[in-house]
Amino acid sequence: MTANRQRLLLAAVMSGLLLAMLDQTIVGTALPAIVERLGGSESLYVWVVTAYLVPATVSLPIYARLSDRWGRRALLLVGMAIFLLGSGLSAAAQTMEQLVAFRALQGLGAGALEGLSFILVADLYGGKRNAALQGALAGLMGVSFIAGPLLGGFIADGIGWRWVFLVNLPIGLAALAVVASVLPASVGRSEDRRARLDLAGIGLLTLAIGLVLIGLSERVWPLVAAGLLPLAAFVAVERRAAAPIMPPALFAERRTAAILVAGTFGAFGMFATLLLLPRYFQSVEDVSATHSGVLLYPLLVGLIVSINVAGGVIMKRGEFRTVILGGTVLIGLGAFGFATFDGGTPRWEAMVFMALIGLGVGPQLSGLQIALTRTLAPARIGGGLGALMLLRQVGAAVALAAAETLYLRGDDPAVAAGTGIVVIALVGAVIASAALLSVPRPATRFALAA
């Protein structure tokens, strides 16, 4: 591809990723307006979010591994078409039950947009360029978590809730046309299509992760426990599969296993902060939902700055552990700041602590992705990044469920929010640090590339 066609493709891929990530959070502030218009049971309220999250998460590694067999373009086009169909149907929904079903379809397509974007960048770019773009994509993820609720509230209040979904169509169709016309069909094909497809692994992974995510979202712990049974069967099946959906070798090698564990837990502080601080601002300081989102921007600024700085430093040093561990230290400092948090804490203090957490989480996003792409052979990058994206989403669900549980057990909203952030952020930072420290120092280095 020429440089211009590469740039055009990159813009399409980033647009698709942004839409998919925004749709995880954009409906949150629009839900009151949606429920008012469509009616239906209050029990379906949370399912509008859960129905999207579960298939989007489960399908991440499946799209990634199948694209090793049939190429990135084929799977990305399938995912984009499903996502756009789900978006259009969601906009046309007449009942809450219909909206939940169409959101599930939308999420099934979103898995391709989320997972294959990072893999395509690794396919098409190398060295410092790849590191910079991986950082940019990770930054888009951070932006979407914070900008989604703001955008959802603005659209619902301004032009109507159906445009929360309709806005995806023109942007998504343009991105689909670019991918279909610019991306060569052969990109990413590295696996013999005659190898037996791992249908048993796909089924067991879908069942296990689905049960775990629904159980965590609803805080129904028996469902989480039930998900462990198919997960154990999945591990056994993957060891014997000719072309496993999630290659066991990723977890058998100490360095890649440590990166995947750190990726699961490293961003706990961000998810706890995004869940609990808006509640504090709304319940204690009596600000609007939109204003509470604006107050989170120190977290976003810290995140964007550190994502880009971390990637550059890692590529310059040719070593990833020091920078990422430095991030966990910053997360710890920011978390400790919330240990004495209460209704009398000045707002500027909360913003400083948020910024520290954002600065610390950035390397956990971009740095770990760079480390994984520099560690794995090109043919294994699809499976590796698919596993990282899946585990990060599961980690987010764990962090949110744990933070919600701690918050609901507290009597004072401000103290409960502070306690939740301290506990969840520190637990995540400690586990991520321990995983990275288990890797011998020479194994954290990689060959520098232009």
Image: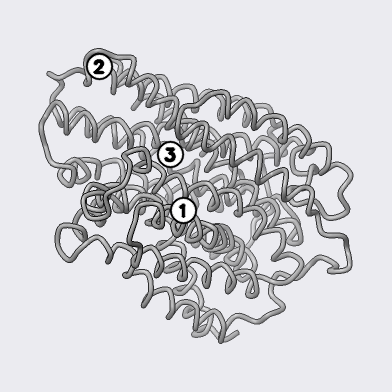
Quarter of the image for the C terminus: give it: bottom right
Q: Which is in the foreground here, disc 2 or disc 1? A: 2
Between 80 and 353, the one lying in front of the other is: 80
Identify the residue under disc 3. Answer: 361
For the N terminus, the quadrant is: bottom right
Residue 281 shown left or right of residue 322 in the figure: left
The colour mode here is one colour
* Mark closer to the observer (2, 3): 2
- Tell me how far mark 2 sits from mark 1, CA to CA: 31 Å
As rendered, which of 72 and 313 lies closer to the eye?
72
Which numbered dot is residue 138? 1
Q: Residue at x 44, y 29 (%)?
A: 401
Q: Residue at x 25, y 14 (%)?
A: 340
How many C-alpha atoms fall within 10 Å of the one at disc 1: few (<14), some, or many (≥20)? many
In the image, residue 387 sits, relative to residue 66, either above or below, namely above
Label 3 crowding class (10 Å Cα cut-off): few <14, some 14-19, many 20+? many
Q: In this picture, is 340 found above or below 350?
A: above
Amino acid under label 2? Val
Residue type at mark 3? Val
Query: Which of the two labelled residues, at mark 3 and mark 1, occupies the earlier sequence position?
Result: 1
Mark linked to residue 415 = 2
Q: Could you say where residue 261 lies in the image, as x and y percent from the top left?
A: 62, 34
